[in-house]
């Protein structure tokens, strides 16, 4: 998507030297736009763990390139346990995100078939690019399917603005391009549908305020930033027509693990008869599990992310401030699980599907053999 | 309650000159403790509007002293429309808070019976002190009734910590002393009951992070700060035993208008069978209205409170930082309404009562004559 009218992806091999992978350091957005070069496995692991990159699809794509980085640094001769050690290191960086494990597995399978170091490098680069391209393609398709849902509401409202609430950043910055939750929004905007987006600021990391608001601004989509506490009030007063969010891991029964606070918005949407959609490329499905609340591991991050807030001072410096009394103990769970009963439908690259086991397997029949 | 082991109220006449009313400037907490002197009606109006003081009871008590300040500055002779003009100015400062209008009416009625300037000053001072004393007394009684609910859970858990979630600051800083939601907490702590409080940070103004965490710290009550998004996850995992919040206006049917985001926590408590209590002195009842969502005016404040966050820098300066892209449009509703169906019970100065019209009037029979 666009930054100052120039097209970017969130991750790309350097045109001059493809051993270097470029990312946008998302910790510094929206106040600083800095491109960071990743070279070593440690670079990639740090970028994922410390959230230079974040978001379901981009974590997966970065993990794909990380395994290519691992191949570049692999020992000559028999790699032994080298690649599985690299995979393990990467998997531990963000425990909730399904795309991470999915991308790493895909690379391990591909690398395992190659006989020598050079072919492993070549193959892993190819697979990393495939993962990234597929992510972008699938997000574009999510947009094509999801825009129909927005168009229906727009028609019912006779062209009055369709008010869409979103939580966190399931935007193009969370993927390689287009985004998941934002793909239908960008498609609607491109189609000239009158829309307006309520952006949850998304504490503690403020992905909504820092990233989603910035994305929408760069694309010219009308939007209003709100505190996470606000959505229930808006829904009670018919100021929201639909909710679209992303997911970091989705059970085969339709439970979704998404940014902490998503569950609260799903409850409010349900209480006010407002459709609640979850947009996802199928790479976020965890086909192994049934019970999201019981089985999805929820990442716990540093309490400092709650206690400290960063931003721009009046004299244009980046500064970090402490909000509560010094020494306050904070807890910081990264995700919560929204049970399928609160999800109106999933928007996938193959189409819109009800959030239940039967319908999900009807749309992804090839996965059925893997499950009991 | 205590600040560095010395007892304070949130508002008090200066012992050396009772024409001066002292408050704690709550905008600067927890990093600076500054006592501010209020003298003129304009001082009081600014203190309420710009949240030097805030919270249901303290707004009421401050409005009481504001009318005394008005009496001190009243013209000699016939006051004409002077006092009703002052009342109108005060009512407009915070439209949602019921205690404000209640305290102003009480003063107008008292002042109206006095015949000369000196007796109006004397009477309005007396009424202001009564309002403040009554607020403290009623909060203490809320604690006496509410602690029984905590003790029951503690007994059922065999003395394991009772985990209480609270939103915003319905602490002693929001009243004259004790607080509403915190009164049962302080009473339980004083009685040696093992408790632990989850403190919602409460965006955008961060009353939880800045005020509730500080109060609990000064009183030595174990607590953990969380982002507002977190409560649903905690409740899904049985990490919360009960919710206690305050209210700024309560209908005679038991709907409560409290800090924005309260409704979301009530939905999550209901979805997980966790008791959801609302603590209030009866001065927050609005006996005129039935339908909280339809009839309670919801204050909309400046979007700057969403866009900017203040806190302490590493070198101990107070600094304000901008989080979203410059120029981002934000909306900032101060309150939302939790319908009575989601409220387990109200904890009042007279006892614990179910949140419905019949039970509320059984506890406050003298109010029945005012209502149809």
Image: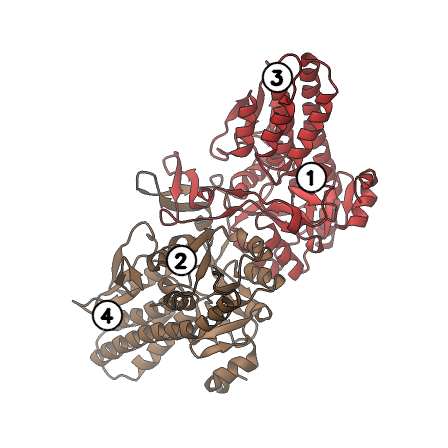
Chain colours: A brown, B red
Q: Which mark is residue A184?
A: none
Q: Chain of mark 4?
A: A
Q: Are marks 2 and 1 in contact (CB under 8 Å)?
A: no
Pinpoint residue A182: horizontal percent, then vertical percent: 41, 65
**Which label belongs to residue B284?**
1
Residue B214, given in percent of the width and then of the height, sits at 54, 38
Q: Residue at x 74, y 36 (%)?
A: B141
A84 to B242, vertically: above or below: below
Residue visible at 57% across and 64% down?
A274
CA separation, marks 2 and 4? 35 Å
| Secondary-structure class at tag 1 | helix
| Residue at x-position 23% and y-position 71% | A72
Q: On the rendered structure, is A53 left or right of B112?
A: left
| Depth order, front residue of A280/B218 | A280
- Location of the N terminus of chain A by quadrant is bottom left
Which residue is label 2 attached to?
A: A212
Task: Classify mark 2: residues with Cα within 10 Å, few (<14), some (14-19) or many (20+).
Answer: many
Residue at mark 1: chain:
B
Asked if badge 3 and badge 4 are on a common chain, one would say no
Label 1 neighbour load within 10 Å: few <14, some 14-19, many 20+? many
Residue named by callout 3 = B74
Badge 4: how crowded within 10 Å, few (<14), some, or many (20+)?
some
Coordinates of residue B339 in the picture (x, y in percent): 68, 53
What's the distance in space between the residues labelled 3 and 1, CA to CA? 29 Å
Tell me the element at label 3.
loop
Q: Are marks 1 and 4 on the same chain?
A: no
Q: Sort mark 3 into few (<14), some (14-19) or many (20+) by Cα contacts within 10 Å.
A: some
Mark number, residue A73: 4
The mark closer to the camera, 2 or 4, is: 2
Judged by depth in the image, the label closer to the viewer, 2 or 3, is 3
Q: Nearer the viewer, mark 1 or mark 4?
A: 1
């Amino acid at each position: 998507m666009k930054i100052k009218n120039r097209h970017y992806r969130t991750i790309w091999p350097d045109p001059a030297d493809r051993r270097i992978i470029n990312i946008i350091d998302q910790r510094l957005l929206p106040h600083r736009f800095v491109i960071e070069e990743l070279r070593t496995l440690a670079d990639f692991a740090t970028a994922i763990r410390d959230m230079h990159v974040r978001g379901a699809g981009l974590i997966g794509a970065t993990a794909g390139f990380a395994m290519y980085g691992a191949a570049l640094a692999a020992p000559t001769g028999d790699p032994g346990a080298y690649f599985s050690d690299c995979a393990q290191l990467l998997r531990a960086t963000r425990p909730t995100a399904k795309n991470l494990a999915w991308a790493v597995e895909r690379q391990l399978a591909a690398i395992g078939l190659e006989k020598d170091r050079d072919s492993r490098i070549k193959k892993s680069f190819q697979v990393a690019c495939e993962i990234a391209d597929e992510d972008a393609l699938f997000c574009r398709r999510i947009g094509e399917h999801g825009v129909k849902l927005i168009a229906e509401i727009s028609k019912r409202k006779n062209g009055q603005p369709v008010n869409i609430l979103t939580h966190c950043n399931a935007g193009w910055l969370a993927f390689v391009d287009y985004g998941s939750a934002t793909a239908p929004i960008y498609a609607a905007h491109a189609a000239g549908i009158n829309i307006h987006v309520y952006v949850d600021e998304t504490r503690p990391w403020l992905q909504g305020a820092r990233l989603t608001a910035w994305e929408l601004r760069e694309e010219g989509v009308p939007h209003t930033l709100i505190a996470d506490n606000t959505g229930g009030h808006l829904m009670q007063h018919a100021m929201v027509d639909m909710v679209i969010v992303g997911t970091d891991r989705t059970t085969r029964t339709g439970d979704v693990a998404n940014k902490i606070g998503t569950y609260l918005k799903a409850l409010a949407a349900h209480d006010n008869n407002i459709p609640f959609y979850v947009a996802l490329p199928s790479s976020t499905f965890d086909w192994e599990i049934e019970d999201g609340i019981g089985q999805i591991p929820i990442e716990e991050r540093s309490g400092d992310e709650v206690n400290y807030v960063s931003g721009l001072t009046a004299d244009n410096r980046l500064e970090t401030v402490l909000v509560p009394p010094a020494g306050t103990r904070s807890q910081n769970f990264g995700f919560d699980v929204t049970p399928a009963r609160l999800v109106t439908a999933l928007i996938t690259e193959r189409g819109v599907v009800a959030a239940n086991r039967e319908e999900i397997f009807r749309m992804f029949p090839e996965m059925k053999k893997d499950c009991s």
